[in-house]
Image (cartoon, rainbow, N blue to C red):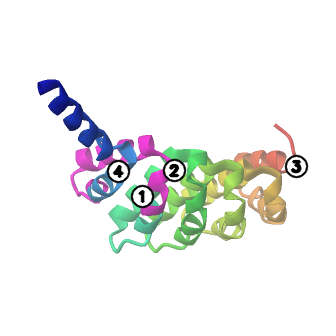
């Protein structure tokens, strides 16, 4: 009799998905913690969301429109950590390159660089960012265009112009090489 009860309990637990949640089932919980002003809690949440991977991308992309710049920065930085696994967030990151907060724009440009060729849809926005008021945003826009590679061919004239500026020359020339199929 005890064995039959144990089997029934085991079957009920298995049917309900078990006692443990799958990591992606905790996405909402980690998204809330990512919004925390506590840097430690937010950092832990970012690491967990990166571990979850692609299932976390839609929620992170939605945070790019949060009213708080701190939250938008955290979302873009977490997407950066996802690298090529965050393809669906590229359009949102492209929009974020126009954010009023410099650090948010910088985080978006860095995230797009980590997306590599998947950031091809962001090329027009990255070209615009080559004229950003902040030098670091311009630098990372160059890097992102280079990471896109040949699909960023439309950026060549703007990168040639950017290469005229001393502080962008190396990154712009590197991007041009990568776009033209070089190493």
Could you tell me which residue is drawn at 68 percent across and 54 percent down? 118
- In three-dimensional space, the C-alpha distance between marks 3 and 1, rounded to whole angstroms, equals 32 Å
Closer to the camera in the image, 162 or 127? 127
Residue 180's label in the rendered image is 3
Quadrant location, the N terminus: top left
Secondary structure under the numbered disc 3 in the rendered image: loop
The percent coordinates of residue 105 (x first, y second) are 51, 64
| Residue 54, numbered label | 2
**Residue 162 coordinates in the image, percent (x, y):** 74, 60
The residue shown at (40%, 64%) is 72
Residue bearing mark 1: 75
Circle 4 packing at 10 Å, graded few (<14), some (14-19), many (20+), is few
On screen, residue 150 above or below 23: below
Q: Which residues are magenta?
A: 33-59
Marks 4 and 3 sit apart, C-alpha to C-alpha, by 42 Å
Q: Quadrant of residue 154?
A: bottom right
Task: Report crowding for label 3: few under 14, some 14 to 19, many 20 or more residues within 10 A (C-alpha).
Answer: some
Is residue 147 depicted above or below 127 in this figure? above
Question: If you read the primary sequence from the N terminus, does the residue marked by circle 2 or circle 3 appear first?
Answer: 2
x and y, in percent, of residue 56 in the image? 44, 54
State which tag comes first along the sequence, 3 or 1: 1
Identify the residue at horizontal 37%, vertical 71% (top origin): 66
Q: Nearer the viewer, residue 75 or 162?
A: 75
The answer to whether residue 135 shows anywhere in this view is no
Q: Earlier in the sequence, mark 4 or mark 3?
A: 4
Image spot of residue 10 (x, y percent): 24, 34
**Residue 150 seen in the figure:** yes
């Amino acid at each position: 009799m005890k064995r039959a009860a144990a089997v029934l309990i085991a079957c009920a637990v298995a049917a309900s998905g078990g006692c443990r949640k799958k990591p992606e089932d905790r996405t909402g919980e980690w998204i809330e913690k990512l919004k925390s002003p506590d840097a430690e809690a937010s950092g832990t949440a970012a690491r967990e969301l990166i571990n979850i991977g692609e299932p976390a991308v839609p929620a992170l992309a939605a945070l790019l429109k949060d009213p708080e710049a701190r939250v938008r920065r955290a979302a873009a930085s977490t997407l950066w950590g996802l690298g090529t696994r965050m393809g669906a967030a590229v359009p949102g990151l492209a929009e974020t390159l126009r954010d009023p907060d410099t650090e948010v724009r910088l985080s978006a440009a860095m995230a797009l660089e980590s997306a590599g060729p998947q950031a091809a849809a962001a090329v027009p926005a990255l070209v615009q960012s080559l004229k950003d008021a902040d030098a670091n945003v311009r630098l990372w826009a160059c890097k992102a265009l280079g990471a896109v590679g040949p699909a960023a061919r439309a950026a060549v004239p703007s990168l040639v112009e950017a290469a005229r500026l001393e502080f962008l020359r190396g990154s712009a020339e590197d991007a041009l090489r990568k776009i033209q199929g070089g190493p």
